[in-house]
Structure formats: C-alpha cells, structure tokens
C-alpha cells in the first residue's frame, strides 16, 4: 500500500499537464490524487504497525549497481507520517492560495513538482539500498528546487534557488563518498546493520553522514540555503520543506547511526554541541528578522537543533550503555519531529494567509490584524504556544522527554552520570526562553496594535482566508492539541523505533514507564480548567464595570499615530545586541546635524553570518581573480598536449622522489 501511495503522490501532478495553464480542473485532480495518496499511505502505515517483522521488498532492476530494495520498519513509520499528512494538507491549501488561474505562468510547474517532492521523500524513507536512496534523494532535491523557485522571474527567488541547489549538491557529494566507503567496508550497497566495520571507518562514515545530511537538515553552519529558500518559496511549499523535507536530513543521520554498531562517546558529544549551537544561533537569527517567513525559517533551524540535542543524548547513551538516555533522547527527538511538522506547517500556512491579506512579508508594515483576521490569529496563537514548548500543546511533550534525559546524565539518583552533557539542558532552556520572545514579537507586531501602513488599512484586503485555506490549518492545530493533551498515543511507535535504532530487546523499559506521559494529560486538563475559570471570572468582572475603548498607549501625544508603537525591530533590539557576536549586525546610525535637521533614517541589517559574511565574499573574490586564468584555455590542441606532458613529467618526478 505504501508503494502505491508513493506512486500516486509522485505522479499526482501529471494530470495538470493535460489541461491549459489557466484551468483549475487539472489542479483539482492533482489535489484529489494527493489526498488519495496521503490516505493510502496512512492506511499502509496502520497495516504495517500490526506486522511483527519489517515489511521488505527486494527485486533486481536495470542498473548494474544495487537493487530496488525497500523496507518499512518502525523508524520509517515515524518519518512517513509527516510525509503523508503535510503535503496532502498543503495541496488542499494550495487550491486557494496558489490558484492556477491566477498563476498561469508557473501553476502547472508548481503542482507537478509539489507532488514529485512528496513522493520522492516517501521513497527516501523506505529505500533500503544506497543506489536507490541516492536516486530518490536527487529527485527530492530537484523537485524541491523547481517547486521553491516557481516565481523564477524574481531575482531574489533565483538567487535563493541557486544557493539551495549548490548547497544540496555539496551535501550529495558527501553522501556519495559515504556510500562508496560503505560499499568498500561491507561489499554491498544494501543498507543492513553491520557489526564488522572497523571503528575508524565507522567514524568516517558518521562524519560524512553528519555533513551530507546536515546540509539538508539545516544544521549550522550548513544551513546557508534554508532562510532564502523558505522565505521565497510559496507558503505551502515552505511548509513542506520546513515541516517535512528538513527531517529527511535527520532521517539520514538516524538511519546511518542505526546501521553502525560501533558508537563512540565523541559521536554523541559532537551532535550535542552541534545541536546546542544550531538551536541558540537559529533562534537568535529568528529574533533579528523582520521578514515573517525568514523568522519561521530560522526558527526551523532552531528546532532542528533541539532534535539534534535529543539524538546526541541517544548516541551518548548507546556509547555508555545507558538505555534510559537512549529512550528519552531518541524518543524525545522523534516526537519533536512529529510536533515540528505540525506546528511549523501550521505557522507557514498562517504566514501565507497574513501575506495575502497585508501584501507584504515585513512584519513592521503590519499590525492590527487581530480584529480583521480573528480566526487566523487564534490559529497563530496555537502554533506559537506549541513551538514555544508551552503546556498544554504538543511542543512541551517532546522537549520534556529530552529535558528528562539530560537530567539523567547528571547522575541523579545514584546512576552513572556524564555531567558535561547536562550543559545541553541549559542551552535547551535558553532556546525555549528566546523562542517565547520571538513569537511574542511576531504576535504583537503582526496582530496587535494598529495598522502600520495603508495596505493593512485597506477595507478589502485583510480578512480571514477562505475555508479551503482555513481547514488545513485547523487540522494541523487539532493535531497540536491532540498530541499535547495525549502524548501517550505515540508511546508504542516511539518504543518500537527506539528498539530498532538501538537494537534493544523487546522487554526493554517503555518510554511511558521511564517518563510517565499520563501526568501531562492531567496537567493539561487542569491547566485548561484553570484558564476557563479565570476567563469566566474576568468576563463576570467586566460586566459589572463600565468599559471604555481607547487607542494604543499614546506616549503622551495628543494625536498619536501608528508610529508610536513598538516595531518588531525595536522589540528584539536588546536580544540582537546581546547576541551580536553571532549575528554581526550592520547598523547605520542617522546623522543629525544643525538646528533644523532633515529627515534621518536608522537601519539595522542582520545578514546571515555564514552565507553573507563568509561564503559570498569568498565567491566574489574568486569571481574577480579566476577569470584571469582563462588565458590557459586557448582552444588550441597543441596547448592541451603541452599541459598533459607537463603533468606527466611532474607525476614522474613525484613518483621518483617517493621511491627514494
């Protein structure tokens, strides 16, 4: 059934090619096929959960290497769930958000590659052969490129697309080297657990996987493609890229570490450090942004950092033979993968609705949308509370498991400890606090106060989107609430995935035993009851008093305007200054001269430290000086023969020196 779902998803965009560029019929058929593929896939997952052994298929094919081999085990199931849910909802959302009749120049292209992206991601997760994996990986990379650059008439979109394409193929080169080394060590392209790989080779494979998959996951400093691609892609494509495609990088690391029986302490320490740096730097960059989609993009990097902290804890537990660390670390990481796919997709859908209403991505040009888009604001609040890991929503449950595992490394209760790992709990707490600040900034700037520009005051623009866009957001919000209140529903799937990854026996302690998730349900219900009581009391209190309406606090001005409000930039300025050593902000101070100075402007620009401060200047220097080497490219045969002769002489000299 899952193979059928992959085929339906992958080819769902074909019907749109049979209709005119302005026809909605093809897009509707494609959406129906996406929905059908997602449902078939979810049914296939339900069937596979009842199988004791992994579902496997292996057949020969036309290529001289490898085989068409797929396997569906507990790890695959954890990653397949978001693949079948988010693109399906995104396709429904896209019917209203990106109507083909309004985008005849790129509508068919977007629909076709959107379906291909979903199908290729599912194939990546079930591939059990290195060659098949790389083929699916490349299809996924190219499909994401063509979907994200649908508006390729925009130079900014083209630039972001090229950065993504280069970054993803640098990662792919590392993966090719990794699988070549795997083939050398195991004499096979089959992705089966191996117990005979020497520790040195296993360590090299691990490092190559961390780099190759790290590019796709957005681990810092390999994240360079992510903010631009997510910001410039259509919002439902951004939701799939952030909510699902980033997890393909995490899946690769999880799968490779599951195949390698060898595990060293430095593996876990390296991943913990990368996770902490990625999380803190990601949310620091998010706070400094004004583009609503770039904020969410950097926030995705932060959440990848949280996932990597959990995976690092699990690797450390495997190296030190601590099953509880493995259960809590990997269990929390996998649960957070589910959670992030829900609330980040919800927030990107929400951002698309806001952009449609305000006609801008700059949050400093928004404001006052709560009155005009109340349902959108409620859904944003649900997503924001979830992503900040606040109870009673789903983000809290996943991070609480990781916190519990990190506290166990302190040796509390007389157990074996590794206190250095406990520092990651401090990083996790810092990430959580900064995430709250980031989304308070977004909520206040976008939805509260009064409109900051005329486009936000236009009577026909700002309004809640149609049902076709609201329902996918509502389904994702419902998922956030369900997992937040009842996290134990994922308990068995988490247990199975952890056992497969670590090779633990069936009788190993369950995650619901190590970390009783039932109390989260009780606490959530108590929290909601308390909030209801407070709301009821406030409502009764308001009825007994005369309430007058007034504008935003006017700072003492008799005729205040929207300019007296805090902007997103001013709200985050303190934290931007605090993390200036990471952000390297460009500050342009105004020059005020004379008794009657002219209008002055203040600018605070936060470029990406790695891409804009390091990589692009290097490429600019190379572009300036490398053209001078074109003199060697004369286009004449005798020059090329001379070059070959010189190289042969140099190699002979080097070989002679080596023999001596």
Image (tube, rainbow, N blue to C red):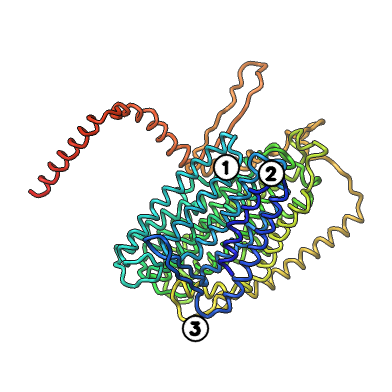
If you read the primary sequence from the N terminus, does the residue marked by circle 2 or circle 1 appear first? Answer: 2
Q: CA distance from mark 2 to mark 3?
A: 59 Å
Relative image position of residue 109 (x, y in whole percent): 61, 45
Kindly indicate the quadrant of the structure image that contains residue 383: bottom right
Return the mark for residue 507: 3
Q: Residue at x 89, y 45 (%)?
A: 548
- Given contact means CB atoms under 8 Å apart, are the residues at marks 2 and 1 in contact? no
Relative image position of residue 637 (x, y in whole percent): 25, 31
Secondary structure, mark 2, is loop
Relative image position of residue 381 (x, y in whole percent): 71, 54
Residue occupying the far bottom of the picture = 507
Secondary structure, mark 3, is loop
Residue 36 is left or right of residue 171, and the answer is right
Q: Is residue 241 visible?
A: yes
The residue indicated by pointer 2 is 20
Q: Nearer the viewer, mark 1 or mark 3?
A: 1
- In the foreground, 216 or 288: 216
Q: Nearer the viewer, mark 2 or mark 3?
A: 2
The residue indicated by pointer 1 is 149
Q: Badge 3: few (under 14), some or many (20 or more) residues near its Cα, within 10 Å? A: few
């Amino acid at each position: 059934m899952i193979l059928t779902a992959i085929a339906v998803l992958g080819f769902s965009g074909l019907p749109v090619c049979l209709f005119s560029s302005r026809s909605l019929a093809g897009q509707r058929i494609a959406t129906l096929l996406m929905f059908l593929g997602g449902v078939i896939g979810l049914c296939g997952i339900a069937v596979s959960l009842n199988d004791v052994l992994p579902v496997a298929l292996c057949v020969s094919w036309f290529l001289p290497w490898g085989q068409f081999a797929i396997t569906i085990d507990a790890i695959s199931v954890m990653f397949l769930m978001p693949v079948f849910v988010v693109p399906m909802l995104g396709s429904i959302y896209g019917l209203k958000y990106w109507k083909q009749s309004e985008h005849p120049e790129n509508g068919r292209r977007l629909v076709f590659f959107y379906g291909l992206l979903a199908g290729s991601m599912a194939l990546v997760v079930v591939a059990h052969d290195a060659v098949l994996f790389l083929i699916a990986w490349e299809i996924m990379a190219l499909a994401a490129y063509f979907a994200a650059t649908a508006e390729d008439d925009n130079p900014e979109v083209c630039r972001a697309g090229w950065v993504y394409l280069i970054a993803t193929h640098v990662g792919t080169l590392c993966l090719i080297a990794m699988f070549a080394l795997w083939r050398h060590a195991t004499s096979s392209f089959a992705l089966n657990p191996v117990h005979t790989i020497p520790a040195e080779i296993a360590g090299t494979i691990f490092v190559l996987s961390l780099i190759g998959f790290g590019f796709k996951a957005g681990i810092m400093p390999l994240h360079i493609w992510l903010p631009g691609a997510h910001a410039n892609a259509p919002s439902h494509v951004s939701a799939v890229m952030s909510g699902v495609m980033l997890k393909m990088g995490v899946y690769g690391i999880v799968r490779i570490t599951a195949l390698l029986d060898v595990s060293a302490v430095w593996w876990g320490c390296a991943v913990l450090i990368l996770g902490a740096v990625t999380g803190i730097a990601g949310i620091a960059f998010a706070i400094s942004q004004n583009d609503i989609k770039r904020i969410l993009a950097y926030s995705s990097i932060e959440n990848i950092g949280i996932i990597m902290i959990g995976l690092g804890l699990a690797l450390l537990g495997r190296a030190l033979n601590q099953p509880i660390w493995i259960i809590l670390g990997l269990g929390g990481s996998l649960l957070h993968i589910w959670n992030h796919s829900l609330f980040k997709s919800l927030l990107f859908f929400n951002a698309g609705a806001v952009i449609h209403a305000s006609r801008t991505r700059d949050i400093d040009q928004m404001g006052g949308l709560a009155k005009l888009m109340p349902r959108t604001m409620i859904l944003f609040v649900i997503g924001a509370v979830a992503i900040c890991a606040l109870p009673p929503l789903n983000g809290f449950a996943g991070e609480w498991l990781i916190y519990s595992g990190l506290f166990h490394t302190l040796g509390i209760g007389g157990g074996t400890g590794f206190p250095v790992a406990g520092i990651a709990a401090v990083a996790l707490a810092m990430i959580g606090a900064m995430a709250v600040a980031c989304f308070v900034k977004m909520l206040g700037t976008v939805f509260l106060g009064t409109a900051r520009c005329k486009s936000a005051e236009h009577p026909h623009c700002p309004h809640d989107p149609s049902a076709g866009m609201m329902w996918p957001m509502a389904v994702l919000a419902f998922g956030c609430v369900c997992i937040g209140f009842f996290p134990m529903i994922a308990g068995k799937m988490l247990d199975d995935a952890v056992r497969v990854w670590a090779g633990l026996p069936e009788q190993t302690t369950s995650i619901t035993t190590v970390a009783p998730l039932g109390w989260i349900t009780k606490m959530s219900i108590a929290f909601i009851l308390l909030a209801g009581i407070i709301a009821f009391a406030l409502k009764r209190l308001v009825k007994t008093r005369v309430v007058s309406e007034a504008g935003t606090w006017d700072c003492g001005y008799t005729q205040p305007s929207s300019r007296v409000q805090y902007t997103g930039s001013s709200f985050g300025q303190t934290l931007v200054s605090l993390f200036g050593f990471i952000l390297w902000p460009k500050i342009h101070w105004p020059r005020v001269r004379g008794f009657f100075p002219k209008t002055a402007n203040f600018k605070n620009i936060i470029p990406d430290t790695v891409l804009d401060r390091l990589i692009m200047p290097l490429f600019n220097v190379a572009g300036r000086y490398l053209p001078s080497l074109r003199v060697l490219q004369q286009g004449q045969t005798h020059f090329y023969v001379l070059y070959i002769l010189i190289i042969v002489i140099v190699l002979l000299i080097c070989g002679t020196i080596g023999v001596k």
